Amino acid sequence: MPLPSIVTIQTAASPTDHTVASILVIYTGGTVGMAYNDQGLLAPMRFSEVTKLMPELRDMRMRVSVVTMPQPIDSSNVTPTEWVTLASLIGEFYDHYDGFVVLHGTDTMAYTASALSYMLENLAKPVVFTGAQVPAGRVRTDARRNFITALEIAAARHPDGSTRVPEVSLFFNTMLMRGNRTKKVESQHFGAFRSDNMPPLAQAGIRLTYNDALVRPLPTAPLRIHTQLNDNVTILKLFPGITERVLNCILNVAELRGCVLETFGSGNASTKSWFLRCLKEAHDRGIHILNVSQCDEGRVEQGRYETSASLPGCGVLSGDDITTEAAITKLMFVLGLQKSHAETAQLLVQDLRGEITLL
């Protein structure tokens, strides 16, 4: 792919200093990269002049460059095509920077961070997602704090010089979380994201405090970029009163290959014969069904209650404590590998990138 133009942000790093970290910022769109123009309208900011809005950047002792996606978009319009472009960009610049910060709209950031965690196999450098609830031009904005802290995290090193957080993560408000463990839970307050089934990788108070024991270890193999995703998938959320007709309409969509089944509690669902028959018929047609709880916390335990004991016999796979965002992107990724039905099912229940906690 042709290399896009790069804007260098003026910081305190000396042009002759080769010991400071070099960070590439990728702007995909969203509130965090917006500012008010001369007409008083919100528009993508000119990153060549970003230090006017964020003067703190001048004091940072790292080299910071910014590349903008070919067509910045609202995150509600993000598709797997943008994920492939983003993964490819990181691959293009991987050997030239010590870390990456991805500026992204908040609405689908958890989906993109989850997808990238699978697509960037053997990642040995930080890829930190962040965004904002309020544009940088506002007085009470969270854009400056989130952006600057994400840069610090992307540049962080252990005393021996090794990368501190070599994985896809998401920083927002005061917490650094594994990207594929997050979900957006708030639209009106600064604490927009949570990671209910895994503690944060770091917390930002007066200083950054890292939980190094939770960070994924450095890989021994080189980076591998995956760009084949299969989007013939769906999410089916159960509710009291769902009918056989509705279930069949969803599971009989042409070319459907995977379904995230959002169940009650610890993975429970109806025991009605028509319901179980629909699931079994879908499985027999080659559709992979991944059981994910509607609860934000806890995990799926198929067989704990009678209402989930029949699901494995219908071919339903347990998603353990995976989020819906990580589950649907995992389906796209694993199906894109074009493995056999059995191999695909085996990969879906494995912990690939720290997205589930195996007991």
Image (cartoon, helix red, strand yellow):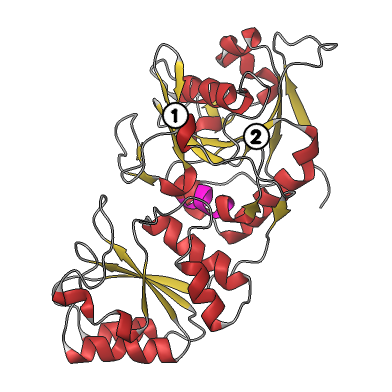
Q: Which mark is residue 100?
A: 2
Q: Tell me if residue 39 can be seen.
A: no
Q: Which residues are magenta?
A: 111-116
Q: Which mark is residue 238?
A: none
Q: Are marks 1 and 2 in contact (CB under 8 Å)?
A: no
Kind of residue at disc 1:
Asn
Residue 174 is left or right of residue 94, and the answer is left
Which quadrant of the view contains residue 326?
bottom left
Residue 5 sits above or below residue 23 on the image: below
Residue 179 sits above or below residue 42 on the image: below
Which badge, 1 or 2, is on the more N-terminal residue?
2
Residue 62 is left or right of residue 236, and the answer is right
Kind of residue at disc 2:
Phe
Image coordinates for residue 230, horizontal then vertical, percent = 58, 71
Residue 325 is left or right of residue 197, and the answer is right
| In magenta segment, residue 29 | no
Observer-nearest of 150 and 253: 150
At 46% from the left edge and 18% from the top edge, which residue is drawn?
208
Residue beneath disc 1: 211
- Local packing at callout 1 (Cα closer than 10 Å; few below 14, some 14-19, many 20+) is some
Observer-nearest of 77 and 176: 176
At 30% from the left edge and 39% from the top edge, which residue is drawn?
186
Q: Image quadrant for the C terminus?
A: bottom left
At 51% from the left edge and 37% from the top edge, which residue is drawn?
215
Residue 333 sits above or below residue 92 on the image: below
| In magenta segment, residue 112 | yes
Residue 75 sits above or below residue 289 on the image: above
Image coordinates for residue 29, horizontal then vertical, percent = 57, 40
Image coordinates for residue 330, horizontal then vertical, percent = 50, 62
Main SS type for the magenta part? helix
